[in-house]
Image (cartoon, grey):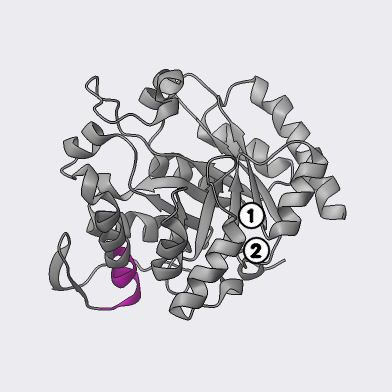
Amino acid sequence: MSLKRCLEPSTLQFGVCALATDRSLSPVQLAREVEARGLEILMFPENSHMPLDRRQDWPPVDGLMDPLTRLYDPFVALAGAAAVTERLLLGFAVCLMTHRDPINTAKAVASLDLMSNGRVILGVAGGALETAMRNHGSEFKQRWKITRERTLAVRQIWAEELAEFAGDFVNFGPMASYPKPLQAGGPPVWIGSNSKSVPGRVADYADGWIVYRGIYKGDAPTDLRAACDNVGRNFDELTLTLMDAPREEADARAWIASGFRKLVYLLPQADEGALARLDEIAALAARLRAG
């Protein structure tokens, strides 16, 4: 199967999202194990630090304090994964655009895409911790406006020989930045968030949606289709990804039947016990592919 085919929204694929830390399996070792089992996607989250003063907490934070303070930088982790694999799709779940300069981010993602032979998926979001955003110079109430502008600016840099951008949060005059990504137009951008506003955001400036099972309150496929109709986008060109996919086969089949084509399973700690879990996920994926 060609890489282009692997990245099509209609292709049924399975993968994992791992909290890889300095106390767990290395991203390099984990990537080898995931690809060896025939899974197609490996995703890493991003979190630069955990402020002790957290004015706006994402509810699950307390139980994840230790791994969230120890996550590998996803750009470095995915570069290591790219070096030891050939087919594995390499995803950010997610890259926090409120924490990143868009010019540097465009170059880093383009470099990774080129060096990995076009295997990158850029998941994006604004983040959940107010103080952490402020530490990076972003205001919590503006997080989605910032995310949108920085994402559009990144895509502009990828697409244009001489890129420029004028917005409320991103401004730069004509400039050149290379390398360009291997994927035409750049890697697909998937928004990873679960509020009622996300379908409209995906239809506006993204290529897909990472829906966290049990958190989004609506019917994601129906809502995204309606948002696409509102702006004249083709729903079939967008990718629906289920994060924290169920391990019960009947439940997984129901999600696939509803329109989800990428099922991503969580590895809360990428430790030695994760290998047995990978075996279980790979066996389930094989049954689901078989129909």
The image quarter in which residue 36 lies: top right
Give the number of the disc on residue 6: 2
The answer to whether residue 66 is left or right of residue 138 is right
At label 1, the amino acid type is Arg
Secondary structure of the residue carrying numbered label 2: helix
Figure check: 169 above or below 274: below
| Highlighted range, magenta | 154-161
Give the number of the disc on residue 87: 1
Depth-wise, is mark 2 or mark 1 nearer the camera? 2
The answer to whether the residue labelled 2 contacts the one labelled 1, judged by CB atoms less than 8 Å apart, is: yes
Secondary structure of the residue carrying numbered label 1: loop
The image quarter in which residue 62 lies: top left
Disc 2 packing (10 Å; few <14; some 14–19; many ≥20): some
Instruction: Answer yes or no: is residue 178 visible.
Output: no
Give the number of the disc on residue 168: none
The answer to whether residue 131 is left or right of residue 241 is left
Where does residue 287 sit, x and y in percent of width and height? 85, 46
At label 2, the amino acid type is Cys
